[in-house]
Image (spheres, helix red, strand yellow):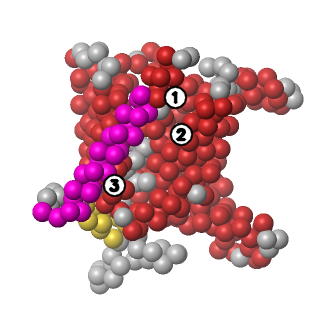
Amino acid sequence: MNHPRTFMDKFFLVIKGLCMGAANKVPGVSGGIVAFVGGFYEEFIYSLQKINAKAFKLLFNGRFKSFYRYVNGSFLALLIFGMLVSYFSVSKVLDYFLEHNELFVWATFFGMILGSIYYIGKDFGYWTKNTITTAIIGLSVGIAISFLSPAKENDNLLFIFLCGMISVSGMTLPGLSGSFILILLGNYVLLLVDSVNALYDTFAELLQGDFGFMDNRERLRTLKILAVFTLGSATGLVTLSHILSFVLKRYKHITTAVILGFITGSLGTVWPWKKTIYKEGLDGKVFLDSNGEQIIVNYERFLPNLQISETWWALFFVLLGIGILLLLDWYGKNRKKHA
């Protein structure tokens, strides 16, 4: 997997990391889809799979260059850099548009998933009894997850660690949204909103030479939760990558069929025309998170009204999403021709 990368390759890899980071934060969208349609899914999985006992041995022996080459460090570093930047920039922009133009954001992602189904399925010519069966299973699971009801928030550190391990599946399994899983587990706001904002505020204060957060018990508690979540995510990422590496090597066609079914099933989660259902008490009062924002628990879907212009604009954004995927496909083909 280690090969010379041009400046444009590196630039696009950072952009893909930005897209993965943004996608991972949106409920219903999988960062793994970005990796799959971006043409670097297998390299991503195999690079993570290289983080093993041999890699740690190289690291502890001080052979840093050998470690970097062994784990495909240039690839992982650029991709992870893009993801980190995304969490403090693109994700903030995405949050803004979700608040002010939610329909168009969901429409764009819906189009991207439609495009990804085409992208994965167009060259898949291995439809057999086994692959059709596994695709149907993947489709069924994807649909079922879309309509599950979420649990209550839980800040137990062991549970937070498990949330990290489970939610990171969105980066390694195309179609399975890690952020949506966190909603189902009841910890989306705590782990992807409150914790990230706490880290952002802490960095901002540190740059100003302000260490006042050290006396803020709630801030320290939130940062501790984020640290445990990050540790769980890293553990899950490496563990899943080893499992997926094994599966991809031995059951590639069946795995692709499952992914194709799963992504198709996830369309229900990102259906643009839906009404947000917020968490309410028995008295009908809406619950708020620590930032004073309403807590989303699920969505009520409905058919679009073709009599209003907003619907046609949404359809335009669906086509835009499909176009983005076709552009990625074109870039991938061009890259192969000039490789």
Inspect the image, locate mark 2, and give the three-letter code of the amino acid beneath it.
Answer: Lys
Classified by dominant secondary structure, the portion drawn in magenta counts as helix
Residues at marks 3 and 1, CA–CA distance in whole angstroms:
24 Å
Query: What range is drawn magenta here?
Result: 307-330
In the picture, measured across the screen, residue 124 lies left or right of residue 51, that is left
Q: Where does label 1 land, which residue? A: 40
Disc nearer the start of the sequence (2/1): 2
Q: Is residue 173 shown to the viewer in this render?
A: no
Residues at marks 3 and 2, CA–CA distance in whole angstroms:
19 Å
Numbered label tally: 3
Q: Are marks 2 and 1 in contact (CB under 8 Å)?
A: yes
Q: Is residue 136 shown to the viewer in this render?
A: yes
Q: What element carries label 1?
A: loop
Q: Does the magenta stretch include residue 262?
A: no
Q: Where does label 3 land, which residue? A: 106
Q: Is residue 327 magenta?
A: yes
In the picture, measured across the screen, residue 181 lies left or right of residue 147, that is right
Disc nearer the start of the sequence (3/1): 1
**x 40%, y 74%: residue:** 294
Inspect the image, locate mark 1, and give the three-letter code of the amino acid beneath it.
Answer: Phe
Q: Is mark 3 on a helix, strand or loop?
A: helix
Q: Position of residue 85 (x, y in %)?
A: 62, 51
**x 47%, y 32%: residue:** 38
**Which of the numbered marks, if any, corresponds to residue 16?**
2
Q: Which of 38 and 246 lies nearest the eye of the viewer?
A: 38
**x 52%, y 28%: residue:** 40
Q: Which of 285 and 158 lies nearest the eye of the viewer?
A: 285
Residue 1 position (above or below residue 284): above
In the picture, measured across the screen, residue 284 lies left or right of residue 330, that is left
